[in-house]
Each structure stands twice: as structure tokens, then as C-alpha cells.
Amino acid sequence: MIENEKSQKRLKIFRKKLHTKDYNSARVQLKELHSAEIALLLESLPANERNIAWSMVEPDQGGDVLLEVNDDLRADFIREMQHAELIIATGHLETDDLADILPDLPDSVTTELLQSMDFQDRRRLESVLSYPEDTAGGLMNTDAVTVRPDVSLDVVLRYLRLRGSVPDMTDSLIVVDRDDRYFGLLLITDLLIKLPQQQVADVMMTTSSVIQVTDLDTDVAVMFEHRDLVSAPVVDAAGKLVGRITIDDVVDVIRDEADQSLMNLSGVQEEADVFGPVTVTARRRGIWLGVNLLTVLVASWVIGLFETTIERLVALAVLMPIVASMGGIAGSQTLTIVVRGMALGQIGQSNALKLMSKELCVGLMNGLLWSIVIAAIAVFWFEDHNLGLVIALAIIINLLVGAFAGATIPLVMSRLGADPALGGSVLLTAVTDAVGFFVFLGLASLYLV
């Protein structure tokens, strides 16, 4: 919350400088910010102010900012940049960062960047690009520092002094043989505190976390979370070292997954730029509005079946939204819990029935409680005890249906190979509305009319 307040304060100050055309001060403010902070600032600006701010970013920092902004905004900036500007912005990027941005660059820029690299860097880049983006291979960096198991710690220390530097997030050195087969990790702390004459093989860790190059990036994120890792080696099927993954890359995966899950719940998974073009945003949202229209028509058809009943008892029209809304909220609560649990690997086919039983019990308890409250309100309002009984039964049934649907929709979508969060709330609303109206109006037709 504190960081968000800082960002909003920074945005307010920057926009004020733009409005007063104090561009020099605005440029100075940007220079003092980290690339990620500049990216957040750009994403928070309307299109006209965003373009002005982007023109103030230092050319050699442009590549780092492009890595941090959302995909839509990155594509827009790259499309407007000149060839020379793109070369300056991206020429200094690390191999894994360049691999992330290379597919978005024009072919002419990509060709020049590849030609400017030495053979070793080009091979590293090709290695990263050969793996899907959502795997450990697409996430890894090839800048790992390796040592042999049959040398002393003193030799390793002299080797590091000769190198003059180590890559960021280096908490350990990776031990490999001459064929690059992975052996273990030599912790930096062990390197510093153990006796210099000891062999690497005597002090290295052989039970460390190793990531397969084909592992999904989400699985990598879970491993980093559970084992509190800073970095981890990546090996291929033959056990050969191909790179390493660091916590800064994993944080991006976690954030992207959280954003995607949140957006998917409302069916707007592609809408990354909150200030994107109106026509693009309208088209993306319109698809799910169309799906929602179909579900609403189903609910309206259900209401139409009981048109005569509603005409005879106007109170039903007043109370109908309560039944549907209560079921929808109960279902949304369950849906959110299930989607989150599936994303964290806590919920699957093995424990789905247990979870469903628990959610049905919760739905029943809440149904009993709130049915009494709503029935009392209905009786007091319309002075009809039978009406109170009907709405009480409808509330209990619809809360149970909401809990059942909220638990089953994401599980079924997962079995079908679809994203459990994608449009789940739209489908849930259709179920709770249709069932809620049908149960309430059906019971009213039987007992009130």
C-alpha cells in the first residue's frame, strides 16, 4: 500500500510538470527512477501524455523500460521507434532479456543485433530462443559461473578475481564436469568460510534444487516459493547445464500469473493496457458481453415461463433479484477460492470432492442463516408468511447451487484444457441466475398462486 501511494504521488507530480510544460524537470524526475518505475509511470498515463514521457526516456535506458511495460504498450513503442533508436535501446541487454524482446523487433533490427554479437553470445541467445517462452528454457539466463569439482577453493577464488565480476543474483557457483554435466552447487558462503585448500567436491551441495529445461515457468515459480531460492540451475534431458534462473525472473512470472488470473475472471485476459485504444478495448470486451447476453437471455426465458405467476403476485418481481444475487455472490466466493487453489497447486482431481463437500456445507450454513433473515424481511414487507417460506427455500437452494457451480466450473474447464479462470464468472452468473429464478418462481407457482 505504501509503495502504491508513492507511485500515485510520483504520477501526480509528473503529470503536473507535463501540464505546466516544465519538461526539463520532468526529464530529471525520469532519470532518477528505476526502469520498472518508469514503466509503471508510462502505463499510468493517458496516451497523449505517455508519448511525451516516452520521448524523455534516455535512449540507453529505453530497452530496460521496454522489458518492463506490458506487451501492448511495448509493441506500440517499438512500432514508433526508428531503426537506430532500437539498436541503441536493445544493444546492451543481457541474453535472457534480449530473448524476451527480440520477437517484437523488426527483422532489420534483429539481423543487425545478431551480427553485432560474438559467436558465444549468439549461441547463448539461440539456446534461449529455442525453448517455448513459458518454460524454464525460455525463462533462463545463460550467464552462469561454473567450476570443476576437482579444484581447490583457493583456485576458485583466484578464478573469480581474474573474472573481475559475477552475474547479478549469484548466491552460488555451479559445479560441472568437462562435458558440462551438472554435479552440484558451491555456495558463496562456503567458498568464503571454508579452508582454501579444500576441494570443491568436498564442500559442494549435491541435493540442491535442479530445474529441467522443459519445466513450465509456473512450476518453476512454485519451486522458488516453496524452497526460498535465489537462483537455480537448469539442465537438459542429458543432465547437462544449459543455464540458470534467478528470483527476479520468477517474480515477473508470479506477477503475470496473478494479473492473468484476475483479468480472466471477467473475460478480459488480453487487456493489459488500461489506457489502450477505445476500439481495441471495446472489441475485446464485446466478445464476453455477447456471451453474457446469451446467458441473460436464458435467465429471461426462465422468467418468461412464469409470466402469469408474476402478474398475479407483484411481490415476486421485487424479490427475484435477491435470490439471484445471493446465489451469485456465494458462487463467486467459491469460484475465487477454487481458481486460486488450482493456480497454487493446492486443488486437483484428488481432493476435488472433499473441497466440494466443504463448500456445500458452507453454502448450506449461510443459506440457513440468510434465508431466515430474508424471509423475515419479506414477511414484514408483504405480510405474507407463505411468501417468506418460499423465498427462504429458494435462497437455501440457490446458495447450494452457487457453491456447487463455483467449485465445478473451474474443475471442468481444467479437464477440458481451458483456463479455469477464463470467463468463469460469466458462466457462474448464468447458472445462479437461471436456477435462482426457476426455483423461486417455480415454488411460488406451486404454493402461492
Image (spheres, rainbow, N blue to C red):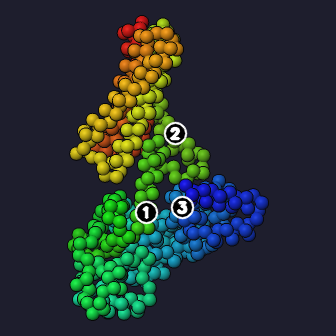
Instruction: Give how far across and how far down residue 1 sits, in percent.
Output: 55, 55
Q: Amino acid at mark 2?
A: Gly
Left or right for 22, reference 402: right
Which sits in the foreground, 45 or 116? 45
Q: Earlier in the sequence, mark 3 or mark 1?
A: 3
Q: Is residue 158 visible?
A: yes
Label 1 to label 2: alpha-carbon separation: 32 Å
Looking at the rendered structure, the kind of residue marked 3 is: Val
Distance between the alpha carbons at the discs numbered 2 and 3: 25 Å
**Number of other residues with Cα within 10 Å of mark 2, as a class: few under 14, some 14 to 19, many 20 or more:** some
Q: Which residue is mark 2?
A: 286
* SS for dot 2: helix
The tag earlier along the polypeptide, 2 or 3, is 3
Residue at 52 percent across and 64 percent down: it is: 68
Which residue is at 32% across, 79% downward? Answer: 187
Residue linked to disc 3:
69
Pointer 3 with pointer 1, Cβ within 8 A: no
Quarter holding the C terminus is top left
Residue 70 position within the rendered picture, expressed as x and y whole percent measured from the top left: 52, 58
Can you tell which of label 3 and label 1 is closer to the viewer?
Answer: 1
Image coords of residue 62 (percent x, y): 58, 70
In space, the residues marked 3 and 1 are separated at their CA atoms by 15 Å
* Mark 1 or 2, closer to the camera: 1
Point out the tag, 1 or 2, that comes first from the N-terminus.
Answer: 1
Q: Which residue is mark 1?
A: 251
Relative to the observer, which residue lies in front, 78 or 157? 157
